[in-house]
Every structure is written in C-alpha cells, then in structure tokens.
Amino acid sequence: MTFENLLVTGGCGFIGSNFIRFLLDREDFTGRIVNFDKLTYAGNPDNLAGVAERYHGRYVFEHGDVCDAGRLEDLFGRYGIDGVCHFAAESHVDRSIRRPESFIHTNILGTFQLLERAKARGSAFRLFHHVSTDEVYGSLGATGLFTEEMPYRPNSPYSASKAASDHLVRAYSETFGLPATISNCSNNYGPYQFPEKLIPLMVLNGLEGKALPVYGDGRNVRDWLYVEDHCEAIWLIMRKGRRGETYNIGGNAEMENIAIVRLICALLDELAPVEGGESRERLITYVADRPGHDRRYAIDFSKLAGELGWRPRQSFAEGLRRTVAWYLANQPWIEGIRTGAYRSWIEEHYGKEA
Ligand code: NAD
Ligand code: TYD
C-alpha cells in the first residue's frame, strides 16, 4: 500500500519533521506530502529548512488548526487526500499539568475532526495512521512490560487526552469501517527535538552552564527510541500493518533519568570540554517531583517484531552520541529557538495568532 496524497499533521514538530524527511527520501514512496501544522511554540519551520526546494512538487506546507473542520474539508478535497499520518498534538506532560485545555482541544477534538474528514472521503481513503504514546498505559512497577492488551490507565492530562484520541480512532475503525492503524511508542530522542523535553533540555543547559533539573530522585525509568527508528516503524505499519490494529513500538533501552543526565554530561565534557576541565555533573540539581510522575515505562513490541519484522537499529549509547553531536553541529537551529527568531518569522508570515 502506498499513498498519492498523504496528509501529515504536525509535520513541523520533532517527530513529524523527521518523518517527512525520512519518507521523501524513500524509494517506496513516490506521492506528495501535505504538511498541515498550526505552528504552535513546538512547530518550527526551521525543522524542514530546504525540504520544499529539494523535493519540489512533492511537498506542500499548509498552515492551520486540526480543530478547524472547514479548513480540513477544503484540504481533503483540494489535494485528494488518500491517507493521513496524524502527529499533531500538544505533547509535553509538564505543560498539560499547568494548562490542560489546549491538550483537550487539539488532541481530542482535532483527532475527531480529522476522522470525520477521512470518513467523508469514503472508498477514496486508504488509511488513517494515528501516532500515539505508551503513556496511555499508565505506570509500571519494577518489572513487567506494556503490551497492546493492557487496559488504559493514563495519569496525566496529556496521556488522558492521547488515550481519548486512541479510543476515537479505534471506534471509527470498528463502527464506520475506517481503515486505521494506531501505534503507541516510547520516548523518542534525536535531532530537532524542542528543548523542553529531557534530552535536548539537558544538552542545551549543559552547554550554557545552567542547572540540570532532575525531578524527584531521578530514578524514574523511560524506554528510549531513536526517532529514525520510530519513523521506520510507522511507515512499515502504514504499508503492511493490519487495519484496525494497534502496535507498540519500543527501543529496548530502559534508562533511569539520572543515568541519562550523567551520560549527557560525559558526552558534552568529551565533545565540548569546558575550560579548566570541570565536569558538567556539577550542574545536576535535584528539584521537586512532577505531580503524578509515572515511575516506569517499558514496552513489549513483540507484535510489531513478529508480524512485520521491525527492530530498533540504533543502540541508546550510539543514538545519544549522534544526538548530542547533532545539537553541537546545529548552533543556528538552537539560536533560532533561544532568541525566538523562529517565532518572529512565523508571526511575519502568518500573524500573531499562529
Ligand atoms: P511536538 O510537540 O514536537 O510537535 C507537535 C506539532 O504539532 C507541532 O509542529 C505543532 O505546531 C503541531 N500542532 C499542535 N497543535 C496543533 C493543531 N491544533 N493543529 C495543527 N498542528 C498542531 O511533538 P512530537 O514530540 O513530534 O510528537 C508527535 C506525536 O507523537 C504526538 O502525537 C505525540 O503524542 C506522539 N508521541 C511523541 C513521543 C515523544 O517522545 N516525543 C513519543 C510517543 C508518541
Ligand atoms: P519528558 O522528556 O518530559 O518526557 P515524558 O514525561 O513524556 O516521559 O521527561 C522524561 C523524563 O525525564 C520524565 O521522567 C521526567 C524527567 N524530567 C526531568 O527529570 N527533568 C526535566 O527537566 C524534564 C523535562 C524531564
């Protein structure tokens, strides 16, 4: 299965932009990508710098909100959309604790509006792929893994809103026969991740000599997946996954937060040593824990491995080294965020509301 006009939502974000680059480079995708993005604080046009020029005619950007039914109706008709890969979301747990409302709008209502438009395309529509998170399953104790059969027990407004969107996608598949697949993935890392998430925040703070804030005792565990491995898994599921099914995606890389922060310090000390040779570990600062902080995530991805033969390619050690090296080599991208220049560009082109 392939697509002629694939709508990618949230394509200016971290994973969406990696996915667009990944897909446009593949020989088994010859269609066009329509990237639909609201350009919130997390949407950065610099993430796709040069793509429109390089893939002329195969990549289009459309600015807008997935909650806007009229805008979606226009897009689906005008481009003859035959597939959706849905990334657009409010994605940061800490923000969802402070201000949950936009999470409910974008993640739940936005997914509903997209499903309605996809359904209205009838037999011209091939697949709705919904990109979701392992956080819908809640928190694990010291042992065990999330499987696709586990009940949903989301603990944060973010994961609750993603859980609701997963249920909607499943319901449209069951009730209306909409061809749909869902993937629930562990924590991603890699190039172009906005520096509010653990890994890029620690890299940038470490480079600037700022405190490295570790929540609680630092012993919460996440499973980490290099973003390119995630892109590969999504594309495989879109092409070959069974319709109506959910697939877990994981990196086989469980790590305590404090161990990651120490690894980042060591990499920065090696690749960008401070004068005098002091280690960045001195910047580690334990801070108040996140409310409702899930203790451990770990993924059983044997369904995806068994049915479609997917495995993560990148080891965590190598992936983290590549990631730190990427941030070091892409200072202009960092400066765009640090100075807010990427926002000025968006406001100039799309107005203050963007
Ligand atoms: P991100 O925050 O980097 O990017 C989100 C993108 O969506 C941005 O470009 C933003 O402008 C856009 N957007 C937000 N609201 C929108 C709206 N109303 N209409 C249109 N566009 C809108 O997120 P990410 O880390 O790239 O995550 C992408 C998807 O993957 C999300 O659905 C997230 O839940 C899921 N996911 C993320 C991770 C992770 O570790 N980052 C892990 C598993 C699943
Ligand atoms: P995060 O990157 O926000 O992803 P998620 O909450 O979706 O897993 O956080 C990853 C882990 O790192 C999580 O256990 C919270 C912790 N964390 C810190 O200790 N300090 C920080 O500054 C941040 C952003 C996260």
Image (cartoon, rainbow, N blue to C red):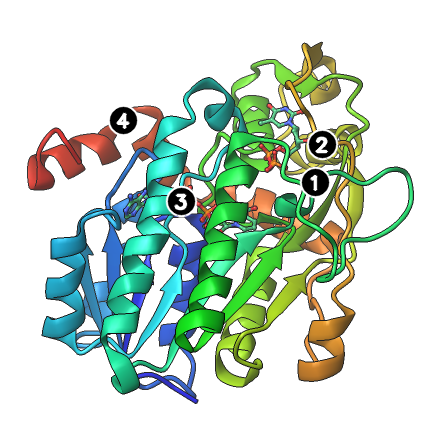
Secondary element type, mark 4:
loop
Q: Are marks 4 and 1 in contact (CB under 8 Å)?
A: no
Q: Amino acid at mark 1?
A: Gly
Residue at 59 percent across and 73 percent down: it is 245
Earlier-in-chain disc, 2 versus 4: 2
**Mark 4 to mark 3 CA distance (whole Å):** 25 Å
Q: Residues within 10 Å of mark 2 (few under 14, many from 20)?
A: some
On whether ligand 2 comes within 8 Å of the CB at mark 2, the answer is yes
Q: Nearer the viewer, residue 332 or 106?
A: 106
Residue at 29 percent across and 70 percent down: it is 118
Q: Are marks 3 and 1 in contact (CB under 8 Å)?
A: no
What residue is disc 4 on?
340
Of the numbered discs in the image, which one, if any, rests on residue 107?
3
Q: Are marks 2 and 4 in contact (CB under 8 Å)?
A: no
Of the numbered discs in the image, which one, if any, rests on residue 294?
2
Q: Nearer the viewer, residue 106 or 311?
A: 106
**Mark 2 to mark 3 CA distance (whole Å):** 20 Å
Left or right side of 57 for 7:
right
Q: Amino acid at mark 3?
A: Asn
Secondary element type, mark 2:
loop
On whether ligand 1 comes within 8 Å of the CB at mark 3, the answer is yes
